[in-house]
């Protein structure tokens, strides 16, 4: 299958009351790309007993070997998330990439547990490469409890990519660090939940308001935003247009559990035409 949107990172299992549900940046990003009219492909590593669920239909998956599948348990209290990393799949290697997929015009690097290294930023010189660095911003203790770490790899990655998308939550409240990151890459975006996002370009900072939504499940909204942003940035070369489109796309995601709320392009365009923007 020829693809035109490549996402690289661990497909994960998220713990839910009755077992597990599929999750991770690769899952939310690829489904968003498919629903917005792209032909996505995933490069990941999974345990042999993992069975791709129907939600990933029409998405090509290149899966390397691993003894385990990366598994998270997310606990939400008062709007704050505490994560536990229960198991981690093997790191992904550049040789895991099918040669033809290196020509994909849009690439989303989406590590969740430091499964990618800085080499991946240099593998796609002709693509629009975007990074969601949450996996590089995590560390975990022996119990699996996840906390924020300093992104030591930033200076080896950001100069080689077109866009950085990161949330306030991933920064652990250290939003001043965005100014440093923004100086290292062409476009940087800090997402701010229902309030929308802040876009950093050429030394300028622009606030782009969000769209109203009745939040049911915020999991994956940042990954949906990132995929929509990269797709629209590739189409328009306009970061502000891309951010507004991504805000609208992500506003659907939070209204339903898991991946079930990820919209089609027609739904996004209708919401952009008719919704009042959150100020």
Image (cartoon, rainbow, N blue to C red):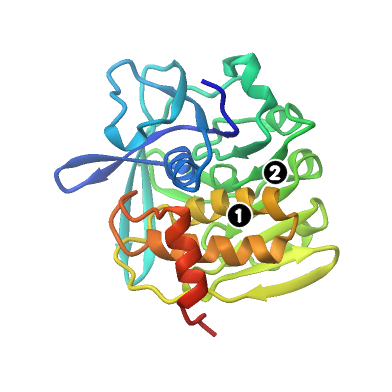
Q: In which quadrant of the rendered image does the C terminus lie?
A: bottom right
What residue lies at 54% left-to-right and 38% top-to-bottom?
111
List x then y, in percent, for residue 243. Answer: 62, 63
What residue lies at 33% left-to-right and 69% top-to-bottom?
215
**Left/right of residue 259 with respect to residue 247 in the rendered view:** left
Q: Say whether marks 2 and 1 touch (CB < 8 Å).
A: no
What residue is pinned by disc 2? Answer: 152
- Secondary structure of residue under mark 1: helix
Q: Is residue 268 above or below residue 53?
A: below
Q: Which mark is residue 94?
A: none
Specify few, some or many for label 1: CA neighbours under 10 Å numbering under 14, 14-19, or 20 or more.
many
**Left/right of residue 257 with respect to residue 8 in the rendered view:** left
List x then y, in percent, for residue 105. Answer: 68, 35
List x then y, in percent, for residue 182. Answer: 77, 58
Real-space Cα separation, disc 2 to disc 1, in angstroms: 25 Å
Q: Is residue 104 above or below residue 211?
A: above
List x then y, in percent, for residue 43. Answer: 52, 25
Specify few, some or many for label 2: CA neighbours under 10 Å numbering under 14, 14-19, or 20 or more.
few
**Closer to viewer: mark 2 or mark 1:** 1
What residue is pinned by disc 1? Answer: 229
**Tag 1 or tag 2, which sits nearer the N-term?**
2
Number of residue marks: 2
Which residue occupies the extreme right position in the image? 202
Q: Is residue 50 above or below residue 4?
A: above
What residue lies at 60% left-to-right and 31% top-to-bottom?
116
Asked whether 29 or 34 is in front, the reply is: 34
């Amino acid at each position: 299958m020829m693809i035109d949107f490549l996402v690289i990172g661990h497909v994960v299992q998220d713990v839910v009351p009755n077992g597990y549900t599929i999750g991770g940046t690769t899952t939310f990003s690829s489904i968003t790309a498919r629903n917005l009219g792209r032909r996505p492909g995933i490069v990941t590593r999974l345990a042999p007993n993992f069975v791709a669920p129907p939600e990933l239909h029409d998405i090509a998956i290149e899966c390397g070997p691993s003894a385990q599948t990366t598994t998270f348990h997310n606990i939400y209290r008062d709007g704050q998330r505490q994560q536990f990393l229960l198991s981690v799949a093997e790191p992904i290697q550049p040789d895991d990439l099918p040669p033809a997929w290196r020509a994909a015009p849009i690439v989303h690097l989406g590590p969740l547990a430091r499964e990618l290294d800085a080499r991946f930023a240099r593998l796609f010189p002709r693509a629009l490469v975007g990074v969601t660095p949450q996996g590089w911003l995590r560390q975990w203790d022996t119990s699996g409890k996840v906390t924020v770490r300093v992104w030591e790899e930033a200076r080896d990655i950001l100069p080689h990519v077109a866009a950085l998308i990161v949330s306030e939550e991933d920064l652990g409240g250290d939003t001043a660090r965005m100014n440093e990151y923004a100086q290292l890459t062409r476009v940087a975006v800090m997402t701010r939940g229902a309030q929308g996002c802040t876009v950093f370009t050429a030394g300028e900072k622009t606030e782009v308001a969000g769209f109203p939504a009745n939040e049911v499940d915020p999991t994956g909204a940042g990954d949906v935003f990132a995929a929509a942003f990269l797709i629209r940035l590739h189409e328009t070369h306009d970061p502000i247009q891309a951010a507004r489109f991504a805000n609208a796309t992500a506003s659907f995601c939070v209204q339903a559990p898991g991946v079930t709320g990820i919209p089609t392009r027609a739904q996004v365009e209708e919401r952009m035409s008719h919704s009042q923007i959150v100020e």
